[in-house]
Amino acid sequence: MGEEHSTGTHPMDDGPMAEIWKLLTEEQKKKVAVMKMDMKIQWMETKINEMQKMIELKKKAIEDIRKVQEMIKQGK
């Protein structure tokens, strides 16, 4: 649902991953951190794409409203 934030010193200090996190080597922890960053980037890119689609939809709506407004002004 929302974003999870850890208040500890490691990205996996609490939750179900805590036990597994303790078993990982430093190199594995780095790989997991990079994977989490990749997922965050993908999520942000998806959100940007959704916003861009909404902007285009709103621009089209403005265009249509202006057409109707012009028709009303001209009495058509």
Image (cartoon, helix red, strand yellow):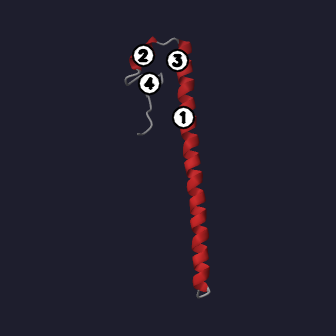
Of labels 2 and 1, earlier in sequence is 2
What separation in Å lies between label 2 and label 4 (alpha carbons)?
16 Å
Q: Residues within 10 Å of mark 4 (few under 14, many from 20)?
A: few
Number of the label disc, if any, that sits on residue 20? 2
The residue where tag 4 is placed is 8
Q: Residues within 10 Å of mark 2 (few under 14, many from 20)?
A: few
Circle 4 — which element? loop
Q: Is residue 30 left or right of residue 21?
A: right
Looking at this view, name the residue that lies furthest to the bottom: 75
Between marks 1 and 4 in the image, the one whose residue lies nearer the viewer: 1
Of labels 1 and 3, earlier in sequence is 3
Quadrant in which the C terminus is drawn: bottom right
What separation in Å lies between label 4 and label 3 (alpha carbons)?
15 Å
69 to 41, vertically: above or below? below
Dot 3 amino acid type: Lys
Measuring from the top left, give residue 43's x and y in whole percent: 53, 38
74 to 10, vertically: above or below? below
What separation in Å lies between label 1 and label 3 (alpha carbons)?
16 Å
Judge by depth and name the residue closer to the eye, 22 or 39. Answer: 39
The residue where tag 3 is placed is 29
Measuring from the top left, give residue 71's x and y in whole percent: 60, 82
Q: Residue at x 55, y 49 (%)?
A: 50
Circle 1 — which element? helix
> Do the residues bearing badges 2 and 1 touch, measured as CB atoms within 8 Å?
no
> Do the residues bearing badges 1 and 4 touch, measured as CB atoms within 8 Å?
no
Q: Residue at x 58, y 35 (%)?
A: 41
Rendering quarter of residue 35: top right
Rendering quarter of residue 73: bottom right
Of labels 1 and 4, earlier in sequence is 4
Circle 3 — which element? helix
Rendering quarter of residue 17: top left
